[in-house]
Amino acid sequence: MILKPAKKSIDIHIEALRGFCALMVLVYHSIIYSDVLDSGFNFRKTIVPFAPDGHLMVLIFFMLSGYVIGLNHINKKFILSDYLKRRIVRLYPVYIIAIIITAVMFTDEWQNIVGALGFVQNLFTNVPIHNQALWSLNYEVIYYILVIPILFYSIKPKIFLTCTILLLGVSIFKFPFPLIVEGYLVGLIFWFTGFIISNVKLSQSHTEIVSSDKLVSVFFLLLSCAFLNPFGRIISQIHFLHGPLLHSLDGIVNINDVSFLPVCLYAIIIASSTNIKWNKFLAGFIYLTTWLYLIFLIKNGSFFKTNIFYVPAFFLIVSTVLLFSPIQIFKSTSLFIKAGSISYAIYVIHTPILEFIGQSGYLTGDFLFFLVRCALLFIVVIAISHFLEKIIQPKIKKLFFKRATPIVSGELSQKSVSN
């Protein structure tokens, strides 16, 4: 493989991963809310009841966010006012427009809208019913605040990650915290893991650029995790160790999400082209355990009792073939790269637009009309997102930053912090 400077190799792959996750969240909501998008049709009752795991994609957003923040601030002079200014300018303009769109289209939940404006949804108000995707922005803002002392005092992030894991252990096995607090801890593990990966990346002067095939193989692996996560069943049983009355899995983010940590870590390492000595071991461990889990489901008959495993199994096969194929199949991931550059807007505006399209009484009632509505949803969401990210956001940024800041490694990714 050709060796190139690390800074030249990470933006495109990270952006592609971000774009893939944003599009999969859009597909996920189109399917699970198919009866909202088209009141006369329910996709989940068709012969292929499959949807990508949108929640997994948000967990990857958490990890990507930590990675990008670390990439742009580790080993640099930290100025709190500049950091806060950049985060506000990055998050708020598109976010406010998304909330305005939600409020204009649906005028029945002003309290939740006001709470979302202050990023206190989940804590003091409910997430806006008509824009459920905004739940994760509350998590993001909390993590942006928690990382300040690490950046200001140059504290090793491993210390904070260790403390987070210990606190989560106390909550699980000894003194259960409120579910929302436990959820913050779980999400923080993903966020700090990405932050630590950025630290490793910055210590490397050169890297081997992964092929498009290998990155796409990661995409298919993530799709297979919707129903073939080998660690989910194990971790979901942990709460029974100290009694189901003391703990549950009802939080937005919960302990069961830790089961996705290995595959999320693998996705970030591949997308960022980070060289870690146990990369191959991690890849082998994930693929081996996933295949063993699939074989287990086939042997005990669960695979054939329901059709939910067929599509994920196909995706796992494709992922494995792409991983080991000597022939390059995918030349680029340009579609996902473009989606990555507008992914934040895609994430925060798509659900109210989905509901708005669903209110139409035209073209409804069967699979073909559902696809037409999906196509319309994608076109409208992408068009508005492009307008917000490529036209509105740059103009607002210029108002706050008079001088253009040189793009550094990871800046491209930071343009779409949608997590």
Image (spheres, rainbow, N blue to C red):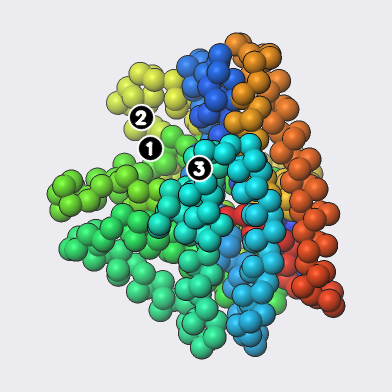
Is the C terminus in the top left, top right, bottom left or bottom right quadrant? bottom right
Tell me, yes or no, whether the two marked residues, 1 and 2, touch with CB atoms within 8 Å: yes
Q: Which residue is mark 1?
A: 293
Front residue of 3/234: it is 234
Q: Which mark is residue 392?
A: none
The residue depicted at 44 percent of the width and 59 percent of the height is: 187
- Label 1 CA crowd tier, 10 Å (few <14, some 14–19, many 20+): some
Q: CA distance from mark 1 to mark 2?
A: 6 Å
Q: For this rendering, which residue is in front, 349 or 264?
A: 349
Q: Residue at x 71, y 38 (%)?
A: 381
Amino acid type assigned to the residue bearing label 3 in the image:
Glu
Give SS at disc 1. Answer: helix
Distance Cα–Cα, label 1 vs label 3: 44 Å
Question: Residue placed at 60% from the left, 82% from the top?
Answer: 80
Q: Secondary structure at mark 3?
A: loop
Q: Amino acid at mark 2?
A: Leu
Residue carrying label 2: 297
Q: CA distance from mark 2 to mark 3?
A: 44 Å
Residue 189: x and y in percent read 43, 63
Classify mark 2: helix, strand or loop: helix
What amino acid is found at the position of numbered circle 1 in the picture?
Tyr
Count of all numbered marks drawn on residues in the image? 3
Q: Which mark is residue 109?
A: 3
Q: Earlier in the sequence, mark 1 or mark 3?
A: 3
User: Do the residues bearing badges 2 and 3 touch, measured as CB atoms within 8 Å?
Assistant: no
